[in-house]
Amino acid sequence: MRHSIVLSTQSAQFQAATFKGDLEKNLLEISSQGYDGVELAIRDPEMIDLDRLDQLLHKFYLSVPAIGTGQAWGEEGLSFSDPDPDIRNAAIQRIKKHIPVAAHFGAVIIIGLVRGIVKPGVDHIQGMRWLVEALVECSAAALPHQVSLVLEPINRYETTLINTVPQGLDLIKEVGADNFGLLLDTFHMNIEEVSIEDSIRSCGDRIYHFHVADSNRWYPGAGHLDFRSILRTLSDIGYQSWISGEFLALPDATTAAERSLTHLLQVTS
Amino acid sequence: MRHSIVLSTQSAQFQAATFKGDLEKNLLEISSQGYDGVELAIRDPEMIDLDRLDQLLHKFYLSVPAIGTGQAWGEEGLSFSDPDPDIRNAAIQRIKKHIPVAAHFGAVIIIGLVRGIVKPGVDHIQGMRWLVEALVECSAAALPHQVSLVLEPINRYETTLINTVPQGLDLIKEVGADNFGLLLDTFHMNIEEVSIEDSIRSCGDRIYHFHVADSNRWYPGAGHLDFRSILRTLSDIGYQSWISGEFLALPDATTAAERSLTHLLQVTS
């Protein structure tokens, strides 16, 4: 398993993007701490200077395992399940714009909050239909580029669509695309899963990416989750991809990143 | 320790009031399952028929350890920390109206969501001042009736005021009243506390009431919390009061109540 951490390429409201601000300074910090990669939160691929990003990533020997897309929802309100077809379409087009960037880096594209929230009173089945339609379309567009999409089950307070791993596995069957899988996040799993380990095992080879944060969304080691058991379970099912830190920048980003990696390496040694 | 479960005396949106609807039928069910008491969620004491309630409670040998007041916030928007002084005062008067009812039953009065939410942009320190003022006034009014108020730390998604046990203990110092203590809830603690057991120990004799729900807010035993360890810790610090079930009515209220009590008795046997 290799270790990465979330970095936002633009300023954003989302609290759990661990690193924000000066790009070069942050990449230097992340690299010198021993991380192998950086998960990029990108609101719109047009807003980033890909050449400069490439140069900096090479300079600091960092890979990009995943691209987070939630800022398109957080900052612009784009969503796969909005009742307005123009907003749904804009969300789909935005995700498609990430495909060449993801292909360039060999990264997965994360479908987090951009799936939207079906508000009380709005038909949940209809919201799910729109979500499946969007995922089918985006997965098909990503396939020729050998890019995968990953949906993250997110706790009940942040969305009404796909809170749990069993719901995520049902969705995978409905979408029916080999390049569509799940991203599991330990913070959300702590609230939603009956057993974190059993849910990991139930996914088999459909876990395409993995987020770590402790029970209080601080860095691993700051709460009461058993990362020794969680990482051992991932290893047992043959997961060999990335472990990516997405947690609050508390007490500050540098300290949190350092303590996270120390804890994760310690419990797997 | 004695066991109770939450019952709403009026219809309400709050999802975690386990029992709702026909009062007599619910009290019969709760009593016949072996519960010793029922925690009453009351929006406004004027809306209940106290004589009939008394008769039914006697009939089914049920005590009332606590009165939940959150519906005044959920249904009417009353709050201790609203910028509007009239709304703050209405919230204070509402809590005071609960005092004779609480005295009658020997119950504590729960300050849950009625404390309100300081919204982004509103000054948090000012919100805390209003909260302390309201708690000082209500505790003083309750004292001659030998009634205690209990504040429940509630997770970050539901309020911005007092999410954690350490914050609750600081608040206790600020309010400075012997009849003001804490209500701990295992669902909220799973999200907010570094260690559930350490937080329980840190409270000493200031835990005046205790809520159980599992990590997913289903009945104890349906998630991944270790109730054997939690209840042992409560016992170790000398807590001898009520264990009150506040969880989702899933798969239904009767089944949830039954499985909860079975699990709690099993882990303490």
Image: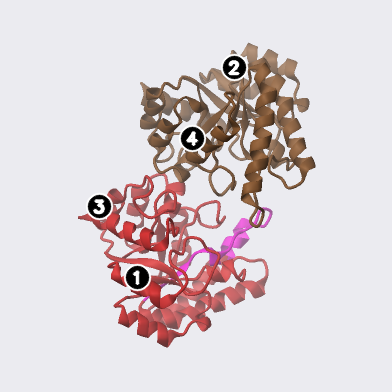
Chain colours: A brown, B red
Which residue: 57% across, 55% down? B160
The residue carrying mark 1 is B29
Q: CA distance from mark 1 to mark 2?
A: 59 Å
Label of residue A63 in the image: 2
Q: Is residue B232 left or right of residue B140?
A: left
Q: Earlier in the sequence, mark 1 or mark 3?
A: 1
Observer-side mark, 3 or 4, equals: 3
| Residue, disc 3 | B267
Under tag 4, what secondary structure?
loop
Whether tag 1 and tag 3 are in contact, CB under 8 A, the answer is no
| Secondary element at tag 3 | helix
Q: Tag 4, which chain? A: A
Q: Amino acid at mark 3?
A: Val
**Which residue is drawn at the image coordinates 61% and 36% (left, top)?**
A112
Q: Dot 1 surroundings within 10 Å: few (below 14), some, or many (20 or more)?
A: some
The answer to whether dots 1 and 3 both sit on one chain is yes
Residue depth check, mark 4 versus mark 2: number of the one nearer the observer: 2
Q: Mark 2 is on which residue type?
A: Ser
Assess disc 4: are there few (<14), some (14-19) or many (≥20) residues with their C-alpha within 10 Å of its C-alpha. many
Amino acid, disc 1: Glu
